[in-house]
């Protein structure tokens, strides 16, 4: 066993009251030196509190990650989410410990708020520490040029799963050699090796999830009261309110739970969190809450079509699944247009942003900042940042800003000293560890910037709806009067609702998405309520 130094953050300790409650629920066990408490690839493991002794946490090849002694507890986010075990725990001294079954722990978390907060925060920070260690979790083999490989890499990243990507053009693993020698063809890519050694060739993201033990597998056909499509803030808000108010609620998502908000490093304007909250934590809390009320979450399942029906609408999903729902909530949000440059994700949320608020303004004071985009949103952001003391350059691709931006804003840009560069498109980013240093334009010119703000417009995730519901000229779903409905969030098809960023005219913010999701449930109830004889 080699030691690569501790990677996991130190864990807080449990209070005497928490320990005594856990003792009632768990089983006391002992382990001798070398005994394995759980191992990489196990389907599940218990929550473990060490009373005496010491346990080392090691990766699949024996590199030590950390050690835990008396008073500490073991566990990581997969204890709650149910993924396959990524690490091995082995006793390094005679050990006496408490083992609490995972499902029992989950129920306890619903009762004990402080314990839930503490474990969740510790498990999230341990997961983030694991994500920074190479060689833990899932291994993905395939070259950068393979689209399927890069989609799998992106999916793992968005889902915050610990993984290592082996660019097979550059590494010497046997799998890479097999590729090199033509034993594996491009159709078999990527090769995904799970903790424990199982190998999958060209799997779908759903197959990987299911093999890892994450995510509910849906029956070929399911019937529910409310189907929520999209598990961003709007969908999660609807799931919590729908399930807690008695609706049989299923929520599906094609990507990662949390949507755009899940990718935010710190949401500063969410009510009730004055110090801000990371998208990861907000999402984990929301999922725990939704499960508490028995909302069913199933990922990754992409909705492919919506077929309106009399009494039940049918949504067809990837992997030949169909859901017949009495009401459907469209909460598929929007994808902010990203710059088509390599490595963008490394900077997002650190020095590359999609919104300019007070926090970013403060962060950027006296720094060189580029605002990218030619619309009014870009102009407003540039003025706001310049007023805060940043040295702002506005980059846009057209020859004349007047084609896309209001005159009053162009005058404001001038007034606050914003430099405008016409016909400027970014080709490359330079920096390290998420800290941007410069960009190269398509012309080859290199410009020093510490921050980038991207205002390239949002694309609604509505292509799968075809013409089934009315949409505005940008593709966002029309609701209420604009859709010919008397109900604020109802789309043009009765019983189909829309909430959050996907809805035409909505405020594209986290709190409003949650609010709309919650509000939609009230309209769903009204839709499902038996009609009075006079209205029948
Ligand atoms: C980096 C970043 C930082 C942000 N920071 C803030 C902030 O600080 N404060 C703030 O108020 N707002 C912030 N926002 C905006 C905020 O996150 C969004 O307004 C909010 O997430 C919208 O929620 P939503 O549920 O409507 O949609 P989304 O969050 O977009 O979620 C939609 C979900 O639907 C899923 N989906 C899409 N198509 C399908 C399909 N066909 N089938 C199944 N599932 C599908 C997606 O995978 C996604 O998970 C930020 C956005 C970004 C990108």
Image (cartoon, helix red, strand yellow):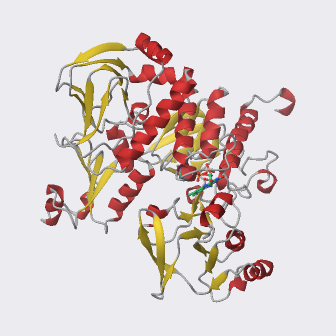
Q: Position of residue 226 (x, y in %)?
A: 62, 36
Nearest the viewer among 149 and 58 is 58
* Residue at the image point whose x is 53% and y is 59% from the top: 349
Quarter of the rendering containing residue 14: top left
- Can residue 498 be seen here? no
Nearest the viewer among 69 and 372 is 69
Q: Position of residue 446 (x, y in %)?
A: 47, 84
**Residue at the farthest right position:** 534
Q: Is residue 427 left or right of residue 3?
A: right
**Residue at the farthest left position:** 181
Looking at the rendered image, the quarter that the N terminus falls into is: top left
Q: Is residue 227 left or right of residue 438?
A: right
* Residue at the image point whose x is 36% and y is 61% from the top: 150
Q: Is residue 88 left or right of residue 503?
A: left
Looking at the picture, does residue 96 appear above or below residue 305?
A: above
Q: Position of residue 82 (x, y in %)?
A: 39, 33
Nearest the viewer among 362 and 256 is 362
Looking at the picture, does residue 429 appear above or below residue 510?
A: below
Looking at the picture, does residue 231 appear above or below residue 438?
A: above
* Residue at the image point whose x is 44% and y is 31% from the top: 12
- Can residue 507 be seen here? yes
Q: Position of residue 139 (x, y in %)?
A: 27, 51
* Residue at the image point whose x is 31% and y is 66% from the top: 144
């Amino acid at each position: 066993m080699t030691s690569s130094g501790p990677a996991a953050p130190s864990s807080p300790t449990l209070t005497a009251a928490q320990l005594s409650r856990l003792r009632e629920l768990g089983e006391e066990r002992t382990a001798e030196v070398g005994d394995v408490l759980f191992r990489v690839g196990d389907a599940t493991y218990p929550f473990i509190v060490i009373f005496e002794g010491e346990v080392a946490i090691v990766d699949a090849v024996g590199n030590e990650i950390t050690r835990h002694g008396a008073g500490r507890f073991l566990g990581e986010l997969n204890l709650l989410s149910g993924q396959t075990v990524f690490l091995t725990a082995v006793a390094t001294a005679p050990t006496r410990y408490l083992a609490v079954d995972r499902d029992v722990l989950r129920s306890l978390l619903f009762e004990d708020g402080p314990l839930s907060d503490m474990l969740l925060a510790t498990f999230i920070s341990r997961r983030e520490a694991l994500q920074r260690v190479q060689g833990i979790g899932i291994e993905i083999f395939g070259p950068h040029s393979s689209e399927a490989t890069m989609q799998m890499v992106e999916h793992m990243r968005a889902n915050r799963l610990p993984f290592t990507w082996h660019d097979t053009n550059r590494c010497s693993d046997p799998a890479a050699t097999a590729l090199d020698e033509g034993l594996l063809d491009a159709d078999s890519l990527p090769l995904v090796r799970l903790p424990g050694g199982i190998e999958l060739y060209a799997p779908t993201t759903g197959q990987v999830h299911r093999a890892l033990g994450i995510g509910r597998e849906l029956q070929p056909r399911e019937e529910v009261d409310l189907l929520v499509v999209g598990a961003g803030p709007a969908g999660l808000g609807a799931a919590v309110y729908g399930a807690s108010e008695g609706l049989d609620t299923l929520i599906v998502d094609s990507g990662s739970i949390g949507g755009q908000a899940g990718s935010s490093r710190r949401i500063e304007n969410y009510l009730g969190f004055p110090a801000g909250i990371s998208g990861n934590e907000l999402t984990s809390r929301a999922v725990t809450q939704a499960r508490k009320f028995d909302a069913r979450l199933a990922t990754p399942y992409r909705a492919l079509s919506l077929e309106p029906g009399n009494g039940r609408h049918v949504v067809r999903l990837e992997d030949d699944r169909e859901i017949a729902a009495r009401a459907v909530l469209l909460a598929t949000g929007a994808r902010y247009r990203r710059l088509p440059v390599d490595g963008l994700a490394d900077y997002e949320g650190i020095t590359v942003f999609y919104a300019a608020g007070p926090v970013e303004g403060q962060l950027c004071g006296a720094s060189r900042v580029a605002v990218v985009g030619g619309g009014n949103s870009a102009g407003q952001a540039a003025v706001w940042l310049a007023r805060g003391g940043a040295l702002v350059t506005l980059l846009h691709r057209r020859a004349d800003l007047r084609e896309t931006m209001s005159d009053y804003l162009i005058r404001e840009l001038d007034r606050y000293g914003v430099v405008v560069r016409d016909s400027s498109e970014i080709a490359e980013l330079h920096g390290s560890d998420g800290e941007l240093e410069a960009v190269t334009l398509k012309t080859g010119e290199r410009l020093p910037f510490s921050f980038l703000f991207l205002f390239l417009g949002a694309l609604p995730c509505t292509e799968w709806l075809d013409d089934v519901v009315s949409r505005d000229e940008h593709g966002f779903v029309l609701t209420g009067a604009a859709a010919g409905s008397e109900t604020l969030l109802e789309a043009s098809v009765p019983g189909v609702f829309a909430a959050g960023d996907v809805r035409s005219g909505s405020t594209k913010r986290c709190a409003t998405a949650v609010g709309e999701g919650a509000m939609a449930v009230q309209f769903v109830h009204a839709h499902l309520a038996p009609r009075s004889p006079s209205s029948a």
